[in-house]
Structure formats: C-alpha cells, structure tokens
Image (cartoon, helix red, strand yellow):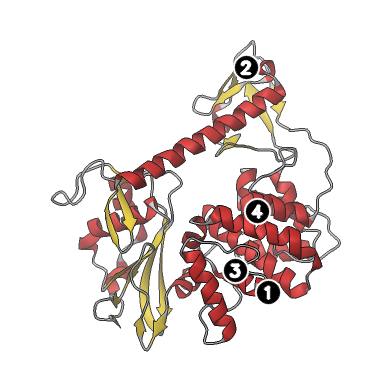
Amino acid sequence: MTSNIKNEIEKILTVEKGSIVTSENSIIEFKKSFNWLNKVDYGKIMASFANNEGGYLLFGYDENGGKFEGLNNSFRSTDSSKISQFLNNTFSPVIKWDKEIILLDDNEIGVIKVYPSNQKPIIAKKFCKAGEIQEGDIFYRYVGENKRIQYSELRKIIDAQIEKSIKILNLLLDKISISGVDNIAILDARSGEIEGFQNKIIIDEKLIKKINFIKEGHFNEVDGEPTLKLVGEIESSSIVIKKEPTVMTFEDITIAFLEQKIDRNIPPIEYIKRICHENSANFPIYYFIEKSNSTINQIYLELEKVVSATKGKERLLNRIKENKKDFSRGKIGANTKQGKDRQVILDKINSGKVPSIQDISGSEIRFLEVVSNLMRPQITGVQDSLFQLMLDLFKSKYSNQKGNFKSLFRLAVCNLDVQLYFSEFENHSDL
C-alpha cells in the first residue's frame, strides 16, 4: 500500500502567492535543502516527532525567506535504507517513517513523514557528533522546536505506558476470572512453553514465531485458527473460542467504535464482516482490524469468503485494496459562509474545546465536514470529548436525518478511524 502524504500535507499547509503561510509548529519543520552530513540533526527531529504525535520534515522551502528553494538531488539519491540504518544504530525502539517527493504549488518538496511511536519514549543509545546526541537522550517536539524532553512531557509518556500495562493486566485478570484459575495456562512466547497444566507443553520452535495470542492486551478471537502441532505428550490442539451467534447491525459497529469498546463475546472481525451486508463501505474498519490481531491480508481473505446480497462486500474489498484514506468533505476556511463556519468550529477544536451538541445545533453538517478533515494530532488532544459528541450526535440525530447527514456522518467516522489506526497497517499489504 502506498502512502497519501501529498493529501495530508495539503490539508495542514496553506500556500498563498507562491509562499507557505503556515509556520513551523508541533508537526511541521522546514529545511532549505537536504544534506546527509546533517543526519544527526534530522535524527533528533525525527525522534522528537516520534515521541510526540508524529510530524513532517519538509525539504526545499526556506521559511525565513518565504520561498521555495527547489529540491536538491541529495534527497533523491540518499537511500532509505541508509537513513534507517543510522536511525536504528542511534535510537531505540525503531522510528517508523516514510520518504516521498511531492509537488506543492508546482514546486518539488521532499517529505519525511514520521509516525508517532507506539513504544515511547524513543531513546538515544549512543553518543553522536560532539555531544549533540548523548547516550540516554530523549528528544521531544515542542511548538516549532526540538529539544531534550522536560519533566511534564516525560511524566505523561511514563504514565501512559503504565496505564497501558494496567489495562492489559486487567484484561488478563478478567479472562482468568471468567475461565477459572484451574483452566488457565500461560504461553511464554520466547521459549514456546505453556505452563499451568499438570504437564508442561512445548510448542514446535518453527510454529512459535507464527503465534501471537495476545497483542496490546487483546486476545485473538478469530474463528477457525489453524491446528497447532505440539511437541510432547499432547500431539495436537485446535485453538478456537466458542461463542453464541449474534445478530449485529450497523449501529453496533458505529457505537463500538465511538465508545472504543468491543463486546467481549463478539470477535472483532465480525464487526468488519457485517459491513459486507450494508450498501455502503464507509464504516470504521482499522480499529477492529487492530483489535482482531490480524493483518490486512488475513482480513481481506476472510471477507472474500462472506456471502452477501448487497454491494457492501465489493465496495469494502475495493476500499481496502485501493488503500482509501481521504474521506474529507468541505474546504476549511474557504471564502464562503460555509467555509468560515467550518473555520470557527475547527479553531475551537484546535484550542482544545470541543463544542457541545447544543453549540452545533443547526450546524451539524459543518461540524461533520470539519471532523472529516481533521488530522491525527488535532484529534488526539480532544479524542474523548470529540468521540462523545459524535456518539451523542449519532444516538440523538442519525436515525431522523436525511441521506446527506448520514453520508457525512459515516465519512467523518471513517476519517477518525483512518487517522488513529491506519498507520499500524500502512505499507504492510501485498494486495
């Protein structure tokens, strides 16, 4: 799957009269040219972005002079593997990034897109260039600058990791309480040993690397997992989770996503399969793919098996295969009343204040258009209140509204899904 960096850049940058009027901020940094001799500086910037909400390093524009400089050949000729090797030798965990050349107002711009790390903090593991990077350094992106992280931001990262671990442990404890302590065994994914039964079971070394029962605290609940060959007194075992048949609707898909909560009795893939029976494919999917602990390819193959009497299946498969990411509607800040109304709503969200359902009464369409244009950094700061407003809007308005409202609502939800969860699967498909 290819990235859609150009569309993302065009959403967050404004070009007027041959100049970029958007200043450097928490997700944007400009460089006049690319020079591999400055790799330490680039590494610090990329680590800073990864430790915050990600960002874009743009080459070929002079912010101080307010003009496009043109992209030098060095950006083209520097192999991505060379950049990755430097980053991997200097920082840990791995920094996830993409490199692309785009046209902006007919000018070539080199872009390095850095994704927010799922394993924060990114830490320097060796000394570089006269102490510009010290072993143990943690760099963080502040508004318009990259510097060693301060206490409050580091505290937030540590607290988030602790909260994540607690959620995983709580989920495991819930599973134990339901199944009973005597019925639980623990798999050590490093050694392949399952302990908890009277006799120790060891899984074949060739299979252990292919098994991933738990990811991010979520159990794999996909029906019909392959039979696993076990070495020892037990010859084989099938891993299947039994569940009762469930009648699901599109409302269940939408509410589960907006509440960020899946019914524990419903395998996540069932939410995606349900879309095959709708007329539209514009529903959240990547959230449920992540929860299913499956790859894009695995999900695609499962969806191909679904028997459907609607166009939903074909449209969903095409959407996945074509890597559709742009669900935006309505131009922000356009010189029209609608554009100005959207800008007012966007400014409020950017300030960290999500409007109430009463505030957007009569302007629901403009609000949904704004949500369909939001980027990940704009969402994460207000995610809880934004999702709650979308949920309130869905429960109180959706069923009584006309087609335009419903279509825009689904597009807005799709954008939230893509912005928050798509990066986990980008460039990981052979479809």
Q: CA distance from mark 2 to mark 4?
A: 46 Å
Say whether disc 2 or disc 4 marks the residue closer to the N-terminus.
2
What's under tag 4, amino acid-wise? Answer: Leu
Query: SS class of the residue under badge 3?
Result: helix
For residue 114, what is the image quadrant? Answer: bottom left
In the rendered image, is residue 257 in sight? yes
Q: Nearer the viewer, mark 1 or mark 3?
A: 1
Disc ID at residue 258: 4
Q: Nearer the viewer, mark 2 or mark 3?
A: 3
Q: Which residue is mark 3?
A: 372
Label 1 environment density (alpha carbons within 10 Å; few <14, some 14–19, many ≥20): few
Q: Which residue is mark 2?
A: 232
Q: Position of residue 341 (x, y in %)?
A: 56, 78
Q: Nearer the viewer, mark 2 or mark 1?
A: 1
What's under tag 2, amino acid-wise? Answer: Gly
As drawn, 322 above or below 138: below
Q: Position of residue 430 (x, y in %)?
A: 58, 57
As drawn, 362 above or below 149: below
What's under tag 3, amino acid-wise? Answer: Ser
Q: CA distance from mark 3 to mark 4?
A: 15 Å
Residue lying at 61% horizontally and 56% vertically, measured from the top left: 387
What's under tag 1, amino acid-wise? Answer: Gly
Q: Which residue is mark 1?
A: 362
